[in-house]
Image (spheres, rainbow, N blue to C red):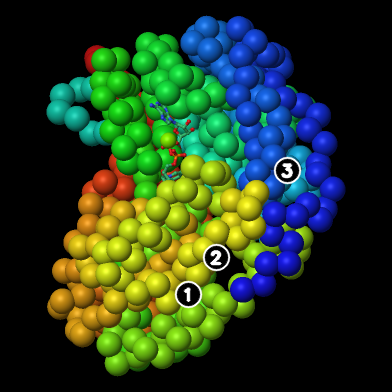
Amino acid sequence: MVTATAGKTTKSAPKIRLNKLLINNEWVDASDGGTFETYNPSTGEVIAKVPHATTKDVDNAVKCARRALETGSWSRMDAADRGRLLYKLADRIEQEAGELAILESYNCGKTITDSRGDITGVINTLRYYAGWADKIEGRTIPVRGNFLCYTLRQPVGVVGQIIPWNFPLLMLAWKWGPALACGNTVVMKCAEQTPLSAMRLGELAIEVGFPPGVVNILQGLGETTGHAMVVHPGIDKIAFTGHVDTAKIIQKNAADSLKRTTFELGGKSPNVIFADADLNQAVEGAFHAIYFHCGQCCTAGSRLFVEEKIHKEFVDRMAEKAKKRVLGDPLEDSTQQGPQVSQEQLDKILGYIQLGQKQGAKLVVGGERVGKDGFYVSPAIFDNVKDDMAIAKDEIFGPVVSILPFKEMGELVERANNTNYGLAAGVWTKDINKAHSYARAIKAGTIWVNCYHIVDTNTPFGGFKMSGQGRENGESALEHYTELKTVTVKLD
Ligand code: NAI
Ligand code: MG
């Protein structure tokens, strides 16, 4: 492991010009002046005190979003023009991509290479949904009797969107894209760890001409600002990405107003290597599956099932790669792994490293804190993991992989499916029969064959079981951002 620049600031920090809430196209402080701190995860330093939106601020944002939805220019705008605004926003983001990537890496700790990739994803997502805006159609339905019957797809209304810190701008785009294409208005709360990049996006949205109240961006903690959104009677739907336990709380609290909810939650995704796989590709792929963005990825391939025949060689090759991983300042192009996002996440991961050893798994490499100020941890490999150990069951959300040897397909499918989660799964083999049989048998929303983490905005994304409800991306997201209306007309 190379740790040349971990915890050291080698690049100059970006200037934070804007640090406010966005309500009705105005930049404001919290109504009570309250703030919370946000950090540079690479050094642990506080970089800004961010306005902490109160219940009153939430209420104000909801009222403005309602006005925009029902009486403002947004409510009268042609669908094609909504699409044009989304295209324009994508174009402005493309022009500002370099600056946005730096801000994202600075606040989130993701490598600059990953941030650039995220921003490409943001642009693709907004353009994809821009194209949908004037193609959201109903049907005419032949009914009994002399009636004309047709359906309309109309916006759900004011949507509350609560997003996490691992892909701040990309999660914003996944939520804004379909919501705005369908004509909804948005009250968004960013994760408290990563509030900054969304503010710049809000500026660009105003600049390209989104009318007041269409996108409102709040900052604050989940238990305060997020909760106030969930219980607000003026919000029609909550779209959430984050922890499964938070989703349970949200679903209970949303029940009183029977809000629509969609959830994209975590996973403990099985990634399976058969002995007949191309081993070079499989090692690369399994490594990327777990260590991409420090393992802070809902689809992380954290349960790595390896066929017994190749188990030892596979572990050795993974360990060799882990030892060479370059940890450092996320703003450096040469850095392969930045810090975890927060002290809280770092502590959680180090806790699991201890627990794994205590429960009898073998820590082959890594799992140590690197540096003393930033939130770095070296990539860890656990071997001899048993299916019932905590490290094989819980979402760790860090660079920690559990290796689980297996003998044959029958046993494997049962073990891979033995989890409450079902977000994603990978399989590496040259045998198409094995690949497709596995793809069909595994209970997960996304299956990757001889690849991993390939997520395109055009395809549905979401989970089976406790990994979520509903689907984001692709055409399927539109269903969750519209209400279906049936109109029946008597003909004489
Ligand atoms: P979290 O679920 O607490 O936070 C996600 C978002 O929900 C944040 O914006 C937060 O402010 C908000 N929130 C929290 N409590 C809320 C409440 N009671 N009402 C309304 N909104 C609320 O996740 P956290 O604490 O950041 O991370 C904990 C774990 O969650 C991670 O270790 C990981 O296992 C999982 N996670 C999964 C993600 C995914 O992509 N599916 C993303 C982030 C975290
Ligand atoms: Mg939390």
Specify the amino acid type for callout 2: Ser
Q: Which x, y percent locates residue 71?
A: 55, 8
Q: Is residue 41 visible?
A: yes
Specify the amino acid type for callout 1: Val
Q: Quadrant of residue 323?
A: bottom right
Q: Quadrant of ligand 1?
A: top left
Q: Which x, y percent locates residue 192?
A: 55, 32
Compute the Cα span from label 3 to label 1.
Answer: 32 Å
Q: Is residue 139 visible?
A: no
Q: Left of 47 or right of it: where is 62?
A: left
What kind of element bears circle 2?
loop
Q: Which x, y percent locates residue 333?
A: 76, 63
Q: Left of 327 or right of it: where is 460?
A: left
Mark 1 vs mark 2: which is more N-terminal?
1
Q: Which circle, 2 or 3, is nearer the viewer?
A: 2
Compute the Cα span from label 2 to label 3.
Answer: 24 Å
Determine which of the numbered discs, if any, sits on residue 103 in the image: 3
Determine which of the numbered discs, if any, sits on residue 365 in the image: 1
Give the residue number, with chain letter if any, for mark 2: 378
Task: In the rendered view, tell whether residue 125 sits above or below residue 254.
Answer: below
Q: Which circle, 3 or 1, is nearer the viewer?
A: 1
Specify the amino acid type for callout 3: Leu
Q: Residue at x 21, y 75 (%)?
A: 412
Q: Callout 2: few (<14), some (14-19), or many (20+) C-alpha neighbours within 10 Å? A: many
What kind of element bears circle 1?
strand
What kind of element bears circle 3?
helix
Q: Residue at x 23, y 34 (%)?
A: 142
